[in-house]
């Protein structure tokens, strides 16, 4: 290693570590003001996703269905919808479990952590921590064109774990404005 590179190496390492730390902080950051949860473009809709598992003790918390009802009811934009994802081994078990949480516009169940819902909302397109329960508030924009349909989704907020989900319900339950 030449002498010039050796002299800037410590500063470069600190800079790179600082960038990584800032990126990690921003990835884990969530808005503290829930009134900012709004779909931005006028042709966007809001969606709220509940990811649960029937075999998870936290997902069987008796206060979770009421918390979900509060969260889901705060989505007031026309066309907004609720999506249920159950990371159950069998689809029937997951659908039965999702039934405890009320009605959904869409339900994805079965396949465990390799199921379509988990792959989309946890591991691939809208990746987040592999933990249940979790609630994802997102903006969804569907654009219809002659060559096909394109869907653009953006996570606005993700709450992971029963305590965070219950906290979101408390925040939304006291909020004067609905999520639009």
Image (tube, helix red, strand yellow):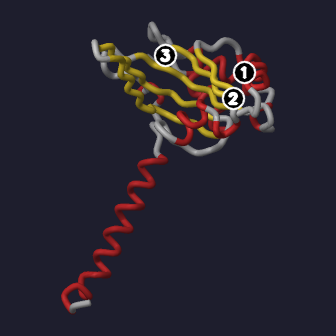
The residue positioned farthest toward the bottom in the image shown: 3
Q: Are marks 2 and 3 in contact (CB under 8 Å)?
A: no
Q: How dense is the environment of label 3, judged by Cα within 10 Å: few (below 14), some, or many (20 and up)?
A: some
Q: Are marks 1 and 2 in contact (CB under 8 Å)?
A: yes
> What residue is rendered at 62% in x and 34% in y?
134
Numbered circle sitting on residue 168: none
Q: Nearer the viewer, residue 93 or 84?
A: 93
* Residue 25 rendering spot, x and y as whole percentages: 44, 53
Which quadrant holds residue 104?
top right
Numbered circle sitting on residue 178: 3
> What residue is rendered at 74% in x and 16% in y?
99
Image quadrant containing the C terminus: top left
Instruction: Residue under label 1, please give it.
Output: 98
* Residue 73 rendering spot, x and y as whole percentages: 58, 14
Judge left or right: residue 2 versus residue 81.
Answer: left
Q: Nearer the viewer, residue 103 or 123?
A: 123
Instruction: Residue under label 2, please give it.
Output: 86
> What residue is rendered at 59% in x and 30% in y?
117
* Residue 8 rendering spot, x and y as whole percentages: 24, 82
Please report whichever mark, 3 or 1, sits nearer to the chain's N-terminal start: 1
Q: Secondary structure at mark 2?
A: strand
Judge left or right: residue 14 versus residue 157.
Answer: left
């Amino acid at each position: 290693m030449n002498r010039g590179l050796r002299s800037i190496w410590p500063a470069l390492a600190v800079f790179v570590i600082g960038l990584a730390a800032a990126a990690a902080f921003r990835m884990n950051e969530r808005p503290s003001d829930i009134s900012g949860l709004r779909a931005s473009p006028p042709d966007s809709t809001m969606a709220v996703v509940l990811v649960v598992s029937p075999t998870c003790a936290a997902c069987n918390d008796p206060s979770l269905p009421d918390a979900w009802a509060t969260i889901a009811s705060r989505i007031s934009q026309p066309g907004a919808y609720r999506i249920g994802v159950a990371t159950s081994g069998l689809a029937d078990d997951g659908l039965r479990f999702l039934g405890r949480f009320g009605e959904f516009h869409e339900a994805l169940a079965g396949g465990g952590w390799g199921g379509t819902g988990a792959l989309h909302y946890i591991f691939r397109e809208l990746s987040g921590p592999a933990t249940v329960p979790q609630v994802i508030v997102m903006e969804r924009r569907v654009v219809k064109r002659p060559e096909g349909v394109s869907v653009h989704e953006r996570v606005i907020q993700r709450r992971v774990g029963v305590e965070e989900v219950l906290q979101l319900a408390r925040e939304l339950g006291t909020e004067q404005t609905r999520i639009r």
